[in-house]
Image: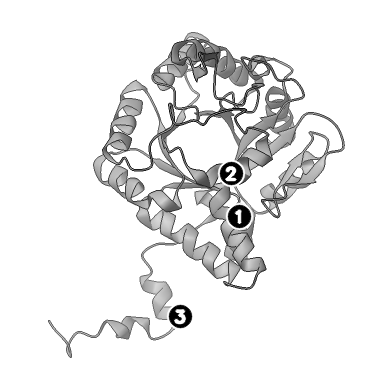
Amino acid sequence: MPFPVNRLRRLRKNENIRRLIRETTITVDDLIYPVFVEDGENIEKEIFSMPGIYRYSLDRLPKELDEVVNLGIPAVLLFGIPSHKDEVGSDTWNEEGIIQRTIRFIKKNYPQLYVISDVCFCEYTSHGHCGVLHDNDVDNDETLENTRKQVVSHAKAGVDMVAPSGMMDGVVKTIREALDCAGFDHIPIMSYSAKYASSYYGPFREAADSTPAFGDRRTYQMDPGNRKEALREVQLDIEEGADIVMVKPALAYLDIIRNIKELFNIPIAAYNVSGEYSLIKAAGKLGWIDEKKVMMETITSIKRAGADIIITYFAKEVAKIIKS
């Protein structure tokens, strides 16, 4: 019935009634926290463009993980910064590589944490691109062969889940076959299914030392103007064996998250990326916004759009607010 019988403000009268009818809520169970681990010792280096986020060596990592566990955050997503880089990123399948050692360390000392490894090459290649280069472009199929070695190496180290981020055609099928043939059919795949060639990644490239030495990644990451293509990517990844699909970035692509939610019956992850994080941090530092309120509104919008899982550098801060 129309006004005045219907008055929607009745259910906004105070915080208690607003809480009772709230449609979207955030819990720590929604969160994955990205962690940067660097080869070396005694490293605890704040990333200039990402205030509050650090690169840790393995000996300093417990400081970070103790807090993550105490806050009840269930999972971490690992990114490695190796001491050795080469043309093909061979440290990604080195049994004593930084990621492999980190996985083993966490599984031994923090068994309650769910460990996800980023599966890519950009942090490990001397040129900063996401695979093997031929004629100044990434060779899709040769990169897939190296991806096989990378994921099996991560699985042998004890990883719980792998997350391929390079946007190579056929990568999910390749990984599923490699893991299954090696006896790791229990390990799920969280695919970066709709990963856009976004300008929001800038701070991450400082964090992971992964800036391309030349050119950009538009021949393998998606054009920001494309929506239907994202749906094709998701459908193909599901057909190839993805257990979770991801949209990256999150905030500028909420429509893509919603489209996937409506069309596919599969868990959806969204990556609240470095640029989204840094913009809020910078504006908060300048006093232009209420940083905590904007942070929570942002995370809520990602879940409201349809994300089941939110990968975010805000995870610890969000968890503290939830627990307070």
Rendered location of residue 268, percent (x, y): 39, 42
10 Å crowding of disc 3: few (<14), some (14-19), many (20+) = few
Is 78 situated above or below 51? above
Q: Which sits in the foreground, 191 or 10?
A: 191
Structural distance between the alpha carbons of marks 1 and 2: 10 Å
Is 316 situated above or below 75? below
Q: Quadrant of residue 99?
A: top right
Secondary structure of the residue carrying tag 2 is: helix
Query: Mark 2 or 3 closer to N-term?
Result: 3
Asked if residue 288 lies left or right of residue 26, the reply is right
Q: Quadrant of residue 286?
A: bottom right
| Colour treatment of the image | one colour
Rendered location of residue 145, percent (x, y): 51, 10
Q: Residue furthest bottom?
A: 4
Rendered location of residue 39, percent (x, y): 78, 28
Q: Visible in this render: residue 112?
A: no
Query: Mark 1 or 2 closer to N-term?
Result: 2
In the picture of the structure, the residue carrying the numbered disc 1 is 278
Secondary structure of the residue carrying tag 3 is: helix
- Amino acid carrying label 1: it is Ser
In the picture, the disc for residue 15 is: 3
The residue positioned 55% from the left and 12% from the top of the image is 146
- Amino acid carrying label 2: it is Gly
Q: Are marks 1 and 2 in contact (CB under 8 Å)?
A: yes
- Amino acid carrying label 3: it is Glu
Query: Mark 3 or 1 closer to N-term?
Result: 3
In the picture of the structure, the residue carrying the numbered disc 2 is 202
Secondary structure of the residue carrying tag 1 is: helix
